[in-house]
Image: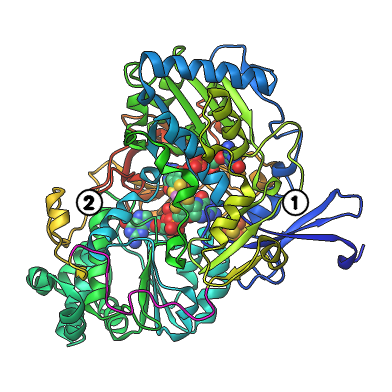
Amino acid sequence: MARDEFIEIKTTCARDCYDGCGMTVLKNQDGSVHRVVGDRDHDLSRGSLCGKCALAYNGVWRDPDVRLTTPLKRIGPKGDNRFEPVSWDDALSDIAGRLKSIVADQGPGNILSTHYTGTCSKIAGGFPDRFFNRLGATEVDPDTVCNNAGHVGLGYILGDSATGFDPATAKDAKVILVWGANPSASAPHFHKHWLPESGARIIVVDPIAHETAKAADVHLQIKPGSDAALAFGMAHVALRYSLLDFDYLAANAIGWDEVHDAVNDMTVERTAELTGLDPEVIVDVAMDYARGPSLMWLGQGMQRQKMGGNAFRACAMLCAATGNMGKPGAGISFLNGAGARGVKTGFVSGPQLAKEPRPVISHMDLADALLDDGRSSALICWNNNIMASSPEQNRLRQGLSRDDLFHVCVELFETDTTAYADYVLPAASFLEADDLMFPYFNYTVGAVAKAIEPPGEARSNQDIFRALAKTMGYDEPEFSETDAEIIDRILSQLPKSITFDELKALGTIRTHDDVQIPFADGKFPTPSGKIEIASAAAEADGHPRVPIAHADSATPAGRYRVLSPATKWTMNSSYANDAKVREQMEGAVCFIHPDDAGKDGINDGAEIELSNKQGTLALSAKITTDVTPGSLLVYKGQWPKFHDASAANVNVLNPGDKTDMGESCCVHGVEAELRVIG
Ligand SMILES: Nc1nc2c(c(=O)[nH]1)N[C@H]1C(S)=C(S)[C@@H](COP(=O)(O)OP(=O)(O)OC[C@H]3O[C@@H](n4cnc5c(=O)[nH]c(N)nc54)[C@H](O)[C@@H]3O)O[C@H]1N2
Ligand SMILES: Nc1nc2c(c(=O)[nH]1)N[C@H]1C(S)=C(S)[C@@H](COP(=O)(O)OP(=O)(O)OC[C@H]3O[C@@H](n4cnc5c(=O)[nH]c(N)nc54)[C@H](O)[C@@H]3O)O[C@H]1N2
Ligand code: SF4
Ligand SMILES: [Mo]
């Protein structure tokens, strides 16, 4: 059939991904789906989805035999995955009854809500919080398992961690520094199109030689956790070669005098020693960056270090000191919230419904909380596969096995987490309900259009929590606001006027016609209104007043540093249950440097075991110089139940240590011993 014979529905990928691709659902004239493809009109994706989504959206995501299609009630022991179908009415009334009695007996704080990246569209990702705000449940802060250290660190110095450069300004940049991100996996179209087409010199700072690093002009293969030392060293070079922008600092920043000596002391030799980098390359890169205009992309991987918050402050200090801020081709970006586009979406989660501030805990404390029946009587897990993604996998499993923990999961699939639930409620995917998507890099908004019916009795997250609210007897108007009304309230804030129907016809639009230059007016939302290199707020919170030139000390002999970033074949743990995706993945592999392999007598393909106090993981070794000596690479995202008899993934080794700031995870700081088992 020719392309123009299909019915085309434009929508937007709602994954937690920088790219925010436009998509087209091609339907046959009888209404069945032919294929889900990339939107040819989308500036970035240009008609192609990434490999993982191309497979999954035409595979498990739409497979009614794999998807959950009816509410399920547990009939076997926790973890046994034995359920019977029940009606929505029965499930909701039993759940409401259980929650009410917990509220009455233990208080609503004993009900925990965990959620995160299942769908990042505004309504399905935000509306359920209206329910939890009204209930007063404990929030397991989602960002603590991902990027909270970066938010807190950047917050101290810039006052705002979610307003970054507009990628459209790349044409004005001479240098783009990709610092601790792996676009080849996590932002594949920025890797493929945006970076090469920018014309800028691409410099990547990363301990792993991933595809973006290999394609870059310069790859600084840094020792993990030594980024702050590099930022100070680069500022040192700029100081020595008179490339610091003292005018910019005087007008826009406070506290430079408090770091000046530390910058002066961080000589190139010392920087090279701490980071493992070549001194000449440090000088060359630092001078080029300082001359600018330069963009600095601060990846989420880099802040998943013990001192990740400090590293972000140090990088932002370098950016300010070289005047690479607030002008075309210059700036810093961690991520861009809807607020960066002038749109306030906080109302979607109904914060006013909370009668008092809700208790909040870190994901790093989730296993502790679940193992303590005085702190947790119920867990509601939605948009989140904690058994694959969260730390302390063994302890988490123990907590989830508690018979007296009332556990509800809202999911698309039978995961390692749903196996422990009392009720599993089938969710509709983003292809099955209208919504909006604000991708977190480009200054765009995309329509998420209902393209197909949910399988069986599956319902969108928002419909499930609307229904549960009603069953609980909540009658606030927030629970009757429709999706269409919410979409209109969001769209009405855009700088240009557009209806949802018009947006659906276009797919994705830029929110502003002109290139945005954040902080061009020199105003920063910090207490002083300036860039706070020295921060009294940080000091009051128990942190150093200024960033420090930190580098992690070497991993003790006999232990390895285990890095577990994104693979290009899964989205966190999503899609790892798709047979075609699994064919593409290399299985449970541990990448190791030849020097270490030689030392430990490991051959390519050898069966090895990583272990620490937390747990043990069996993997097969792959020898490569893509990793540095002393570090190992084990991708995140495998489903424990597909692993082997031990039913674990890399998070079985993750002790849930907290970063310096934001009670956030430092997964790239995990250490383990290695042993050959076959
Ligand atoms: N070792 C290690 N661990 C990590 C990381 C790491 O780098 N290393 N990264 C961390 C990071 S950055 C993050 S953000 C977290 C992410 O962790 P999670 O948020 O747990 O991400 P997923 O594992 O993809 O799980 C999302 C689940 O939501 C389901 N889902 C999809 N759409 C919907 C929907 O519309 N409704 C509902 N109810 N469910 C839906 C999917 O089927 C999937 O099982 O993992 C963290 N874990
Ligand atoms: N394909 C795919 N895409 C994804 C995801 C996915 O799971 N798969 N997850 C999504 C989510 S939730 C997130 S948060 C983003 C994350 O995407 P990114 O921001 O790219 O973060 P990571 O993949 O965790 O890690 C990026 C890089 O940080 C490096 N790194 C680790 N430690 C250090 C260090 O000490 N210093 C420096 N300089 N670099 C270091 C790692 O080697 C890795 O190459 O990706 C999103 N996109
Ligand atoms: S996950 Fe990212 S790259 Fe893949 S289709 Fe979705 S937005 Fe595009
Ligand atoms: Mo994340």
Amino acid type, callout 1: Ala
Residue in the foreground of this view, choosing between 227 and 526: 526
Find disc 2 in the rendering and name its residue. 554
Mark 1 Cα shell of 10 Å, populated few (<14), some (14-19), many (≥20): many
> Which labelled disc corresponds to residue 451?
1
Magenta span of residues: 512-527
Upstream in sequence: badge 2 or badge 1? 1
Where residue 119 appears, x then y in whole percent?
57, 47
* Residue plotted at (21% across, 86% down): 243
| Left or right position of 361 against 481 | left
Judging from the image, what secondary structure is the residue with disc 2 in? Answer: loop
Q: Is residue 197 magenta?
A: no
Cβ of disc 1 within 8 Å of ligand 1?
A: no
> Which labelled disc corresponds to residue 222?
none
**Residue 226 seen from this side:** no
Where residue 469 appears, x then y in whole percent?
54, 29
| Left or right position of 191 against 252 | right
**Residue 466 seen from this side:** yes
Q: In the image, ligand 2 is in what quadrant?
A: bottom left
Residue in the foreground of this view, choosing between 25 and 528: 528
Judging from the image, what secondary structure is the residue with disc 1 in? Answer: loop
Question: Label 2 to label 1, Cα distance in Å?
Answer: 52 Å
Cβ of disc 2 within 8 Å of ligand 2?
A: no
**Discs 2/1, front:** 1
Where residue 191 appears, x then y in whole percent?
53, 69
Q: How many marks?
A: 2
Whether pointer 2 and pointer 1 mark residues with C-beta atoms closer than 8 Å, the reply is: no
**For residue 3, above or below residue 655:** below
**For residue 8, above or below residue 559:** below
Q: Assign the magenta stretch its main secondary structure.
A: loop
Amino acid type, callout 2: Ala
Q: Give residue 491's quadrant in the image.
A: bottom right
